[in-house]
Amino acid sequence: MNLSHLPQSRLAAALSLAVLAFASALPAHAQSQPAAPAHTFVVDGDHFDLDGKPFQIIAGEMHYARIPHEYWHARLKMAKAMGLNTIATYIFWNVHEPTPGHYDFSGQNDLAGFLKAAQEEGLYVILRVGPYSCAEWEFGGFPAWLLKDPKMNRALRTNDPAFMVPAERWIDRVAQETTPLLLAHGGPILAVQVENEYGNFGNEKPYMQHMLKIFQSTGYKDSVLYTVDPSKALANGSLDGILSGVNFGTGRAEPALATLAASRPGAPLFATEYWPGWFDLFGHPHETRPLAPQLKDIDYVLGHKGSINIYMFHGGTSFGMMAGASASTGNYRGNVTSYDYDAPLDEAGHTTPKFFAYRDMILSHTHQPKLPVPEVAPVVPLPEFTVTPTSTLWSKLPKPVVSEKPLTMEQVDQAYGYILYRHQLDAPVSGKTLTLNPVHDYAQVYIDGKLVGTLDRHYDQNSLMLTTTKPATLDILVENTGRLNSTKNMRNEWKGIQSATLGDAAGSGTPATATPLTGWQIYSLPMEDVAAMQTGSPAAGIGSTPHFATGSFTLTQTGDSFLDISALGKGLIWINGHALGRFWNIGPQDTLYVPGPWLKQGKNEVVVFDLFAANGPQKLVGRIKPILDGPTPTYASDPERKKKEDPNAEFGPKLAVPATPAP
């Protein structure tokens, strides 16, 4: 633009307008970002240098999506008080791009706001962009709409354009939000992660090289880029020319760092995920890990000039329907809502004995002064109150999609919640087998509104016997209990059912026969507009079917609380419109965390959706302490129990301690 012909006053005005136009094109956080001095962070041989001086990363992981934004600063202050100098966080793609091309970086999803909060609290940041996260989060952070493309059953995390085109679009978009906050531009971001534990998934180097080029084509080229993998998968997931880190659990510091040192001689030792705990699965006992070997691990890493990221420093909560599912022991198992993780800072942000022991160990290496521990939000009991059934699910069904064959959630543009399949049986059925191929994840089968059986993916159940005395309505209600967040089985994590057949069992010398059922009404039930779905008037027996129930309680003082949901069956719960999460009476989680900012003085409204029969009002109460280790009555007969109890199952084969320790 040539402005030389303008008078000086008009030239100044034109330049001002140009600057304003440029600023308005930037992301909101970049417009308001104050000028800050640039810094340098580099790999220098076997260590990191920050502004030309050796620097050990002593980080803790916390995910902004798992923490009410009102508490971000409080949790970050706790990290600083434990002696950490850095925070690591994943960016969950599904949170920010819920539908293709539509982005949300506001409010609870204000990623830049979280990063700036970390800087304001004197912390650096490790940004785990992905695009894959894992983290026991729904679909590992991938948006469910990817699965609408049938190519995704082979394309996910490959060079196939079906995956790479939306992935590159996403990385470019998140780079717009975050690259102004790189250390080189005066922000807090030290390093940026390329992919995540890809070695656990595959070993296609062209895919990883392509992913690296995408990162290098953005402003991320101005940051230290790195990959992470467990010890056994380092070779598959690392890339020549960029930093590699290793992930491992309790008691494995020495062999894990030795493996990394052998893989990358002379490079920094970086424990990119050190697991102080583990996640909980529905129906399995609550997970904890012993403290003493963890202190030895931290001492070993820091004593060998290594850097560390404690995963998790603070786990938080997978609110709503964001808890994923695991297949780490073989079969599908849904993750509970709590992501307490036996972390140093518990689910509600309170210190634990692990917090103070970790702090003492860290400070013994850094020789920093001991900071006071910040106060935490008050915890208040919620008075006992009643939730009363108000309406059945059947009375609130939306307009159906009509299809010859069953369609999955993704095919009807639904991500989470429930989906109902209705078929009219035009003749009596006598002892025939209904087979669903398969069930993703939990199905209740009804004949004329009466429950006749359940099918649970946790136990590989997909068929039951049907008998009717007349033509009838067949209803199959399917719950998405969470998509797998790891392994190649993610590629087939569509939800609902894909086919249903009715047939005769095989007899003596006679093969089994099955007839596909066609002609379906499909009701999408994402549970988004719950207020509209649950209104109604109480009626006798309403709670004997999937139903909504409502109640309220009054507070004179607000604070955090833990809602005891042990009286409920299986479903979802909201307080004042905020989705607390899933509950299921097979344990181990018997309370749901209720953040204080979601409560108010005066009347608080509660909505429950329960798949199981209630047959009347239920009493609920808010406790001042969580119950995460409740009874798990189904565990005794769980076929996964022996695998789960194998100490090596969660972490892969046991690593031998090398004769020569890591440098």
Image (cartoon, rainbow, N blue to C red):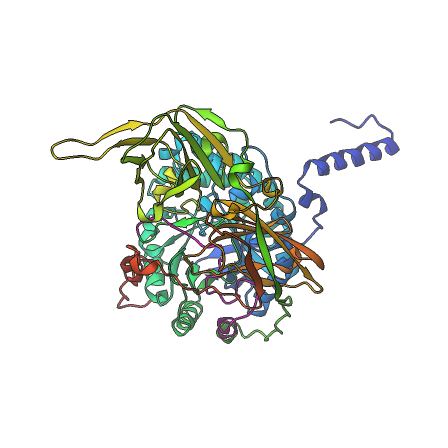
Q: Is residue 347 magenta?
A: yes
Quadrant for the C terminus in the image: bottom left
The quadrant where residue 505 appears: top left
x then y, percent, for residue 381: 61, 66
Report the side of 191 relative to 605 (left or right): left
- Identify whether 601 is placed above or below 206: below
> Which secondary structure type mostly characterizes the magenta part of the structure?
loop
Q: Is residue 278 magenta?
A: no
Between 71 and 641, which is closer to the camera in this rendering? 641
Between 228 and 90, which is closer to the camera in this rendering? 90
Report the side of 644 relative to 141 (left or right): left
Between 364 and 384, which is closer to the camera in this rendering? 384
x then y, percent, for residue 432: 27, 34
Report the residue that reaches farthest toward the left: 509
x then y, percent, for residue 525: 51, 37
Please state the extent of the stretch shown in magenta in the rendering: 330-358
